[in-house]
Amino acid sequence: MRLSRRGLLTATTATAVSLSAPTASATSVTQVTSVSSVTSASGDERGRRLRTGFERLAADGYALLDGRRVGVVTNPTGVTRDLRHIVDVMHADPRVNLVAVFGPEHGFRGTAQAGGSEGRYDDPATGLPVYDTYGKSGQALADVFTASGVDSVVFDVQDVGARFYTYIWTLYDCMEAARLAGKRFMVLDRPNPVTGRSAQGPVLHREFASFVGRQPVSQAHGMTVAELALLFNGEFLSAPVPLDTVLMTGWRRSDFYDVSGLPWVPPSPNMPTPDTALVYSGTCLFEGTGLSEGRGTTRPFELLGAEGIDGRWAAEAERLGLPGVHFREAYFTPTFSKFQGKTVGGVQIHVHDRDAYDPVRTGIALLVTARKVWSGFAWRPDAWIDRLTGSARVRTMIDAGATADEVVAAWQGELHAFRRVRERYLVYA
């Protein structure tokens, strides 16, 4: 019998579903409902223990990897609760035939800054060959998987919940390359640190696709990496890849990262804390301007500024009365990136109610107010802001004098359409 695309998606995730709901039938399509029941019935916030996809895979004796030649796509965030790297753990376990590691942007061990990677080398700790995925996609990346000798590719990277954070597109590219190379793919799930409550922000228009957004996804997607993998497989890949998703238990969509009890390892050099992740999906838009987005400070994406800005910006932003956030006049001297070694003025974002806070709306409001109070405001000449927002609309509306509310209102139709698609792939309560 020839399976439909949707039927193949269900079939290829059946093993992972049985891990997520171990008391029920592995082949029942209703297992996704059981996942929600298990997660929502796991106790109160203090009594509930989150278990990551890797923890569940290991607790099951790596049964899903039995007989496979395994390669892992990961970075420094791929750690256990006691901060051992999963590559080191699996390499030392005779039940896993781990033969290769694949590093994304910033590298497997995380030594590279934004826009960089570590290249091809042998890992000193394990002797395993480490292959560089950054900047590769399609057949070129499929050839890397083929050359590595793996038959299964496992993904375990901590995401931060924003469309333009490149790890989710590493996931997408690796899924497509695994399909081309005839490999099986597995995603070990981790929490979305800024909750999975809702999608927010503009949706990417395909003509603006790049490595900070391959497909029509909203700016803050509100999904875990396993849910995104299901979305990619069901909606965006040229054909589905054989896919296992090992889900978490003990995670709710309303959970911020501190509820998880997991240690925070910076996913990239400028994502030092979960507080950074909380604001990032809005203030990363300042990468598309001449202002500093706080790189080179201890508070990237929370500090924003430029030479010539004074306290008027913070005052103007504060007057908007945005929910959950206050703005403080701030001065800082970046140690690298924009305005390196120069003292600049601007704002620091202080989130006081993270449940009420809307990072995307806040980011738009800060762009609008910066342009209003500072004559030096300018977009980056390469129109990077259009790549980040997913179209030219935000830039052109702000240039035309639109308010933040008008800009936000303009993307609501496409956002609602994305939310309807997204809903089909949500597997947690």
Image (cartoon, rainbow, N blue to C red):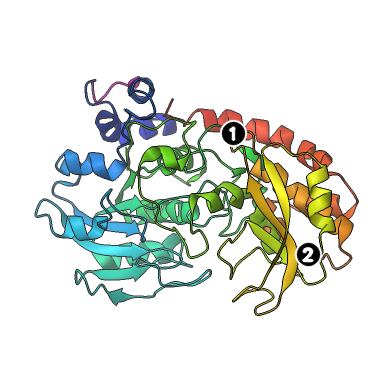
Judging depth in this view, the residue of 421 and 7 nearest the camera is: 421
Picture coordinates of residue 397, whole percent (x, y): 84, 49
- The residue furthest bottom is 341
Q: Which residue is mark 2?
A: 379
**SS at circle 1:** loop
30 in magenta: yes
**Residue 7 shows up from this direction:** yes
Q: Is residue 12 left or right of residue 221?
A: left
Q: Which residue is mark 1?
A: 355
Find residue 31 and report its horizontal and vertical position in percent.
Answer: 32, 23
Residue density around tag 2, few if under 14, some if 14–19, many if 20 or more, within 10 Å: some
Q: Residue type at mark 2?
A: Trp
Q: Closer to the camera, 12 or 36?
A: 36
Nearer to us of marks 2 and 1 is 1
Q: Quadrant of the C terminus?
A: top left
The x and y percentages for residue 65 are 19, 47
Element type where label 2 sits in the image: loop
Which residue is found at the position 56% from the left and 41% from the top?
221
Quadrant occupied by the N terminus? top left
Task: Choose the circle earlier in sequence order: 2 or 1.
Answer: 1
Contact, CB < 8 Å: mark 2 with mark 1? Answer: no
Measured as percent of width and height from the top left, residue 428 is found at 42, 29
Q: In the rendered structure, find residue 139 and report the number of the disc placed on it.
A: none
Question: Is residue 395 something one can see in this rendering?
Answer: no
Instruction: State the extent of the magenta-drawn residues as a range.
Output: 24-31
The residue nearer to you, when weighing 380 against 338, is 338
Query: Image height check: is 400 above or below 44?
Result: below
Q: Residues within 10 Å of mark 1 (few under 14, many from 20)?
A: few
Q: Left or right: 312 with respect to 82?
A: right
In this rendering, the answer to whether 43 lies above or below 52 is: above
Up/down of 194 relative to 112, above or below: above
